[in-house]
Amino acid sequence: MINNKYKGDDSTSKDSVNTTSTDQKQINSREDSRSISFAIEDIRRSGFHEHNLLIYSDLPSFRQIYSQCTKQALENNEIVFLATTYDSFDRIEDTLKSKGISVDNEKKDGNLIIVDAVGTYQVDTYGALKLGRSLAMRATREGKAGVFNMSDLGSFFLSESIDTLIEYEQSLPKKWISSLMPYVPIIKATLTHLAMSSRERCSTVTIVLSELRIEADGSK
């Protein structure tokens, strides 16, 4: 896995690192919490046929989002499929357990599937898509509400496969099968880095991804 090679900020977003007063930091913290809550609510309101994008500011925020969404999805009788780029499997499982999720039981019952996004996307670009469709068919057979999927696209940036990412996203349908709800998370820093290295390629990626519904720090 490439997960441990990530050198980004694991505690706070860049924008929140400052020398403001304690009162101001508390205000910023409350605003961040509200933004995360709004994002979670919006994600869970999405339809199963939608193909959506989530741009998150830092890993702690993303952990709050995917763990709470996973909890709600499992409680709604959905299968959860997570593809991770930056967090190890152990870190994800610990985060989910902190929300009261019985990870071992959910995995054993086939309700929770966690895979390495690097292996899933970089070995077979359509690997996550194939697995998602397979799980959607199983969900229908077993009478599940559907499949909630978060597959992080960071591996495309880590492996410098931006052209492949563009081709992949352009090839996907705008509407998916009715029982699959795919979200594709991207950490904001990767887009910033791409903009600094190549304005043209960043513009192309932005145009491609702008066709998706964007949940960026609680806004669209």
Image (tube, rainbow, N blue to C red):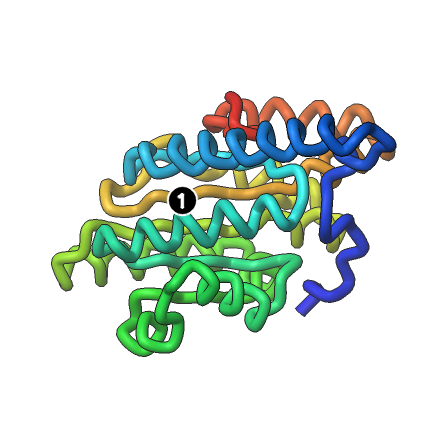
Which quadrant would residue 32 be assigned to in this image? top right
Q: Residues within 10 Å of mark 1 (few under 14, many from 20)?
A: many
Which quadrant would residue 187 be assigned to in this image? top right
Q: In this view, does 76 lie to the left or right of 31?
A: left
Q: In this view, does 45 lie to the left or right of 202?
A: left
- Label 1, secondary structure: give it: strand
Residue 97 image offset from top left, x and y in percent: 45, 66
The residue lying at 64 percent from left, 34 percent from top is 29
Say which residue label 1 marks.
182
Residue 36 image offset from top left, x and y in percent: 52, 36
Residue 213 image offset from top left, x and y in percent: 46, 26
In this orientation, which residue lies closer to the viewer: 88 or 181? Answer: 88
In this orientation, which residue lies closer to the viewer: 26 or 34? Answer: 26
**Image quarter in which the N terminus is found:** bottom right
Q: Give the answer, above or below, for where 189 lies relative to 215.
A: below
The residue lying at 57 percent from left, 72 percent from top is 90
Q: Give the answer, above or below, for where 45 lies relative to 143.
A: above
Q: Give the answer, above or below, for where 42 lies relative to 74.
A: above
The residue lying at 57 percent from left, 29 percent from top is 216
The residue lying at 32 percent from left, 78 percent from top is 108
Q: Which residue lies furthest to the front in this view?
A: 23
Label tally: 1
Circle 1: residue type: Pro
Q: Is residue 73 left or right of residue 144?
A: right
Residue 27 image offset from top left, x and y in percent: 65, 27
In this orientation, which residue lies closer to the viewer: 97 or 177? Answer: 97
In this orientation, which residue lies closer to the viewer: 150 or 35? Answer: 35
Which quadrant would residue 112 be assigned to in this image? bottom left
